[in-house]
Image (cartoon, rainbow, N blue to C red):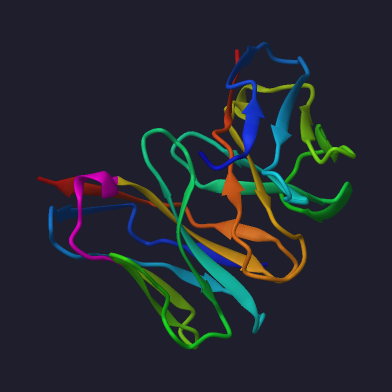
Amino acid sequence: DSGVTQTPKHLITATGQRVTLRCSPRSGDLSVYWYQQSLDQGLQFLIQYYNGEERAKGNILERFSAQQFPDLHSELNLSSLELGDSALYFCASSVVGLAGPYEQYFGPGTRLTVT
Amino acid sequence: AQTVTQSQPEMSVQEAETVTLSCTYDTSESDYYLFWYKQPPSRQMILVIRQEAYKQQNATENRFSVNFQKAAKSFSLKISDSQLGDAAMYFCAYRSVLNDMRFGAGTRLTVKP
């Protein structure tokens, strides 16, 4: 158990809908990262938050948005869903968001299926 | 932009033998961090080993070690005394000092009993 929690574990929804994925980082971790893993593919970095502020952005679609709240949990919002958005969405956290070899600890992921 | 390439989509090793997984990356930065993550069938991402680019010494974690060649931009993972539990997808990852993390496409490792 990495200490990072994600809810829900599974999510099935229809095209055009909007969903929210939730992540709680490990205790003490200020940084939260979101990744997308499509079937049998590598991980695509979406976005990073550090202590409530956006710190880095990857290949995140405009239909997707995220935020980190004062209690440090984070939410990833996916809207106008398309079939291609079906994937495993990971949240990871690390001690700090600045330079350093601090490894990221991954949650179990949320499997999103868009039908 | 940094890219990470894992040229071996699949690898196979006999139990108790040694296997090496390859990873190359492209970057113009001099300071960065490299990682190997393991993803078993449960899909959980598990950190295997990490390497700071400024360190010349190769990292080692029990049966796992890396061969870091900075000039060649190569970061291979060696698994010694392979065990059935080592069977998984292995991802090489590059992290810049700005925290942008890039993953390779992965190598699926099969361990034969």
Left or right, B68 with reference to A25: left
Q: Is residue B83 magenta?
A: yes
Residue at screen point 71% across, 63% down: B99
Give the image location of residue A62, x and y in percent.
83, 38
Give the image location of residue A59, x and y in percent.
71, 48
Q: Is residue A46 above or below residue B102?
A: above
| Quarter of the C terminus of chain A within the rendering | top right
Q: Is residue A52 above or below residue A96?
A: above
Label tally: 0
Residue at screen point 71% across, 35% down: A24
Left or right, A10 with reference to B62: right
Q: In this view, does A53 lie above or below A113?
A: below
Q: Is residue A30 magenta?
A: no
Q: Is residue B68 above or below residue A67?
A: below
Q: Give the range drawn in magenta.
A: B78-87
Give the image location of residue A88, x and y in percent.
56, 32
Residue at screen point 17% across, 55% down: B13
Give the image location of residue B81, x and y in percent.
18, 61
Residue at screen point 63% across, 75% down: B32
Taking depth in this image into account, of B11 and A110 the one nearest to the observer is A110
Taking depth in this image into account, of B16 and A95 the one nearest to the observer is A95
User: Residue A26's quadrant in the figure?
Assistant: top right
